[in-house]
Image (cartoon, rainbow, N blue to C red):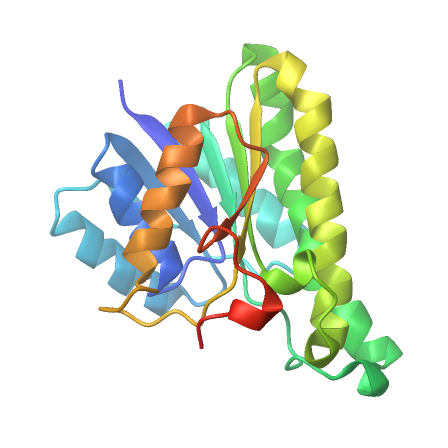
């Protein structure tokens, strides 16, 4: 019987690559983002590869839409074995620390931390009941290192990393894997930062289940980010 992965914040880059990687390894794929038209395009691409996939539109800022999307995933596919969380950082661009405002900080926090909490709430009760499942959080390097130009986003991403690592500590004894992968790259298809390579790392971490955290590339720092 196939397993199911739900990808929150699915897009044509990393989200699609993760869908392809897990789909090639006998997963059904549920894609979640707010743009239904773009989701349907991704579904068609996956289906052309004989990967079972479906679109579930929802805005991460909308609690009711998120709940409805997950309810519909469960009706179609049953138990959600893996949740991968990697939405965009919100409605504001990365802002230098000196230009952080209440509005752009709250927006990033809502899009990343609050949305993660409400997404986890949709899958964790069943995972705890089955003592099985995985929660995968993809962030940027500012989740680990203070980076002045990522002022508003870094506040949120560091909070998301804190949440993910605490979840790992809480849930490992319950046989639920929680992983965090921080990206120190600008993703460019066909290069050393191809999203497919990141998807490979995620699948290896999921299968191994020994690492709470890693970076891509391994050991990357703000001084060695691949632009």
> Residue drawn 35% across and 48% down?
199
Point out the image quarter for the N terminus.
top left
Q: Position of residue 92 (x, y in %)?
A: 67, 80
Residue 142: quarter of image: bottom right
Q: Position of residue 17 (x, y in %)?
A: 30, 54
> Residue drawn 69% across and 37% down?
165
| Closer-to-camera residue (219/211) | 219
Q: Position of residue 222 (x, y in %)?
A: 60, 69
Can residue 50 be seen?
A: yes
Number of numbered discs on residues: 0
Q: Is residue 67 above or below residue 57?
A: above
Residue positioned most to the right = 102
Q: Position of residue 195 (x, y in %)?
A: 33, 60
Q: Is residue 58 above or below residue 96?
A: above
Point out the image quarter for the C terminus.
bottom left
Q: Is residue 156 left or right of residue 205?
A: right
Can residue 78 be seen?
A: no
Q: Is residue 211 left or right of residue 3?
A: right
Q: Is residue 152 above or below residue 109?
A: below
| Closer-to-camera residue (199/16) | 199
Residue 223: quarter of image: bottom right
| Closer-to-camera residue (181/22) | 181
> Residue drawn 63% across and 19% down?
172
| Closer-to-camera residue (56/154) | 154
Q: Is residue 120 left or right of residue 102?
A: left
> Residue drawn 67% across and 53% down?
115
Residue 153: quarter of image: bottom right
Q: Is residue 90 left or right of residue 192?
A: right
């Amino acid at each position: 019987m196939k397993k199911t992965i739900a990808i929150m914040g699915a897009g044509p880059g990393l989200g699609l690559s993760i869908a392809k990687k897990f789909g090639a390894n006998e997963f059904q794929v549920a894609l979640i983002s707010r743009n239904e038209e773009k989701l349907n395009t991704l579904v068609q691409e996956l289906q052309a590869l004989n990967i079972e996939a479906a679109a579930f539109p929802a805005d991460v800022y909308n609690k009711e839409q998120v709940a409805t999307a997950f309810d519909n995933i469960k009706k179609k596919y049953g138990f959600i074995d893996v949740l991968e969380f990697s939405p965009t950082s919100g409605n504001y661009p990365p802002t230098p620390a000196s230009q952080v405002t209440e509005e752009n900080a709250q927006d990033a926090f809502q899009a990343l931390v609050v949305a993660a909490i409400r997404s986890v709430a949709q899958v964790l009760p069943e995972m705890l009941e089955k003592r099985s499942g995985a929660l995968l959080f993809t962030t940027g390097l500012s989740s680990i290192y203070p980076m002045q130009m990522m002022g508003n986003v870094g506040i949120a991403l560091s909070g998301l990393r804190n949440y993910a690592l605490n979840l790992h500590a809480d849930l490992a004894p319950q046989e639920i894997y929680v992983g965090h992968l921080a990206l120190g790259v600008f993703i460019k298809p066909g290069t050393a930062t191809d999203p497919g390579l990141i998807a490979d790392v995620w699948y290896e971490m999921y299968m191994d289940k020994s690492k709470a955290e890693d970076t891509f590339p391994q050991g990357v720092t703000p001084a060695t980010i691949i632009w």
